[in-house]
Image (spheres, coloured by chain):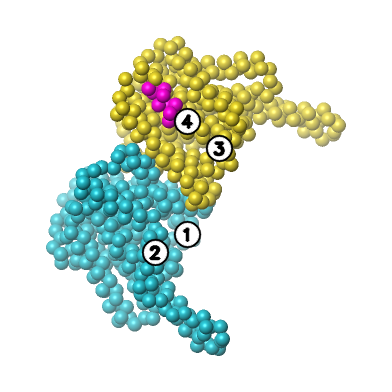
Chain colours: A cyan, B yellow
């Protein structure tokens, strides 16, 4: 049984995240910050604080001691989810199934690992869970977000081709038959997706962090304190500023649940029930047991990654659902994560 | 003699401050941040990060174990400086002497204690120097900035009265004899100065921190971790963001030395030579010896407090000199502080 003091330690880890978010929310409501000023703080988080935090996380993680069984479970969960969504899309035979594939995949399998995952899991299962979260972060950036952006780019290219065909069919004007473009090849779409990912400072943070850790743990060298301190003076601000920024984002939305209650319910069930359930199946399949199993399940029940919303907004693919997923998800995550934490201990 | 490893530890404490500043400078030069976005970050520092940092500093400082001799030296230094400046103003018999009194007083006696003082002194003389810096911060807010703002408000009121008298004398029109206002009393000016100080979030940070410390160290209670963590999630960002903000401020100035080389030299000599010299005199007068004497002198040789520039800008009283004092001061402070550190150890 989890003791009250243990539970309190988890609450202790979560409340500061909410405090920072509430401060951001109140600041905008009290008109202490303009939209552009909020954008400045958000930009600082995205360009400097978060990438440096990711770098320091990965740089301090021993890549030669990765838990392959844990990563296998995480990978299998995402493949199971992808297969399930593909099967549903085939059965539903909807024309616009691709956007839904991306949205559901993000909701099911992409939790907020860096900002919420590490502090919350650390509060629950100690320092070892930080290492596990970092390993999931590596795969998130190296594999899964590339797939998400590939699907979004593919969807964009397909839509553009469809518009061209439509333009060719109606009135069959002289200009449109000339301007009709070919649908780009999958290889070109993949290249575009990789380029997108390469524009993210987080990508460099994780790539350089991984490279450095490969060198550091192979040759047993350490980052000089003078460099590490210079990185940490900025990176320590990441969690507080990111949650503050989420708060300002919430305050600037017109409605709390912008996609309607029905879709919000679907999003919440996908995030907090189906995603973790897929993780249970995948974990048991690869033989994950004990604390590792619990860490795997709880991290799968964290709120939606903010980056998923960023892409949804950029590609106009269900941004309202994703915004609800992030906002309501963060609100619900305290009780839900605690319930998972307690139930898994039984 | 100071060992190389000791000296390196001080550099280790200072370089991160410069790294954060350089990042801010480069960000603006690379057009990664707009002026309004920089204002957002600066506003965050001023309204939340800094006040919370001050609160946590003061809250963790035992007010019943203040070093009265150290504070007496600090107070005497400021009184000596004020007397010296007043004597100079009387001898110079300039009509516009009051603005110069404020500017010279700030240059001589108000160092950057919170953002640079604590980390740098901690790197030099260990944790005990943090406690001493905090005690100086208390006096800075409770006494010295109130005097500075009082003088600035007094200057403003005198100028307004002079304008009225001039208007009365020329063409002696019907409206101006009616609108002539009396020069406000010193009590009213003091009230305005206090009001100004009460508008500063830093004031609340230090007042509440002091009050809490008086309670906490009297009744031996501690801030619950859940509250302390909620404060620190924001306050940890203060030093990095403040230095970043100074960097963005530098990058947006047209010239590095906006007041001209001659005045810049005067400002630097005042800050880095005369101010510390006054501290030496005051310290010896009250019998300060050993490490306390060194801490006192080195802190007196820190760069100019950013808040002094803020007021200079607000009251249009030599903002160009103060901006140079802050910018060039921060640049010169590494070699100068290190020289003081090494020389004082001889």
Q: Which numbered disc flags the more N-terminal residue, 1 or 2?
A: 2
Q: Position of residue A312 (x, y in %)?
A: 41, 66
The residue singled out by tag 2 in the image is A195
Report if residue B337 lies within the magenta region. yes
Q: Is residue B75 left or right of residue B342?
A: right
Mark 3 highlights which residue?
B256
Q: Work out whether disc 4 and disc 1 sit on a shared chain.
A: no
Q: Main secondary structure of the magenta part?
A: helix
Q: Is residue B143 visible?
A: no
Q: How far apart in space, not on screen, are marks 3 and 4 (Cα)? A: 13 Å
Marks 1 & 2, CB-CB < 8 Å contact: no
* Lateral position of residue A187 relative to residue A165, left or right: left
Helix, strand or loop under label 1 = loop
In front: label 1 or label 2: 2
Residue nearest the observer in this picture, A232 or B163: A232
Q: Position of residue B70 (x, y in %)?
A: 41, 18
Whether tag 3 and tag 2 are in contact, CB under 8 A, the answer is no
- Total numbered badges shown on the rendered structure: 4
CA gap between label 4 and label 1 equals 46 Å
Range drawn in magenta: B334-342
């Amino acid at each position: 049984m989890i003791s009250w003091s243990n539970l309190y330690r988890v609450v202790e880890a979560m409340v500061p995240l909410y405090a920072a978010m509430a401060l951001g929310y109140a600041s905008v409501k009290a008109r202490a910050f303009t939209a552009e000023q909020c954008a400045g703080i958000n930009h600082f988080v995205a360009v400097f604080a978060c990438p440096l935090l990711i770098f320091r996380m990965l740089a301090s993680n021993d890549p030669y001691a990765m838990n392959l069984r844990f990563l296998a479970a995480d990978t299998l969960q995402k493949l199971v989810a992808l297969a399930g969504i593909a099967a549903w899309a085939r059965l539903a035979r909807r024309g616009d199934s691709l956007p839904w594939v991306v949205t559901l995949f993000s909701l099911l399998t992409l939790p907020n690992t860096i900002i919420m995952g590490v502090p919350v899991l650390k509060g629950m299962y100690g320092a070892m869970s930080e290492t596990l979260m970092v390993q999931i972060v590596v795969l998130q950036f190296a594999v899964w977000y590339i797939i998400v952006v590939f699907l979004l780019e593919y969807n964009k290219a397909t839509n553009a081709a469809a518009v061209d065909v439509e333009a060719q069919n109606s009135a069959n004007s002289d200009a449109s038959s000339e301007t009709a473009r070919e649908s780009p090849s999958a290889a070109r779409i993949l290249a575009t997706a990789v380029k997108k990912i390469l524009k993210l400072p987080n990508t460099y943070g994780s790539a350089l962090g991984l490279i450095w850790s490969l060198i550091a743990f192979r040759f047993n060298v350490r980052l000089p304190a003078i460099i590490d301190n210079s990185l940490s003076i900025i990176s320590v601000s990441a969690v507080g500023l990111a949650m503050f920024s989420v708060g300002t984002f919430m305050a600037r939305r017109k409605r709390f649940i912008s996609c309607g209650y029905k879709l919000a319910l679907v999003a919440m069930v996908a995030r907090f029930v189906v995603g973790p359930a897929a993780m249970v199946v995948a974990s048991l399949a690869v033989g994950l047991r004990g604390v590792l199993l619990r860490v795997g399940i709880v991290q799968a029940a964290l709120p939606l990654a903010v980056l998923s919303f960023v892409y949804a907004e950029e590609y106009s693919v269900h941004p309202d659902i994703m915004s609800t997923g992030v906002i309501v998800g963060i609100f619900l995550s305290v009780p839900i994560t605690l319930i998972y934490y307690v139930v898994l201990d039984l």
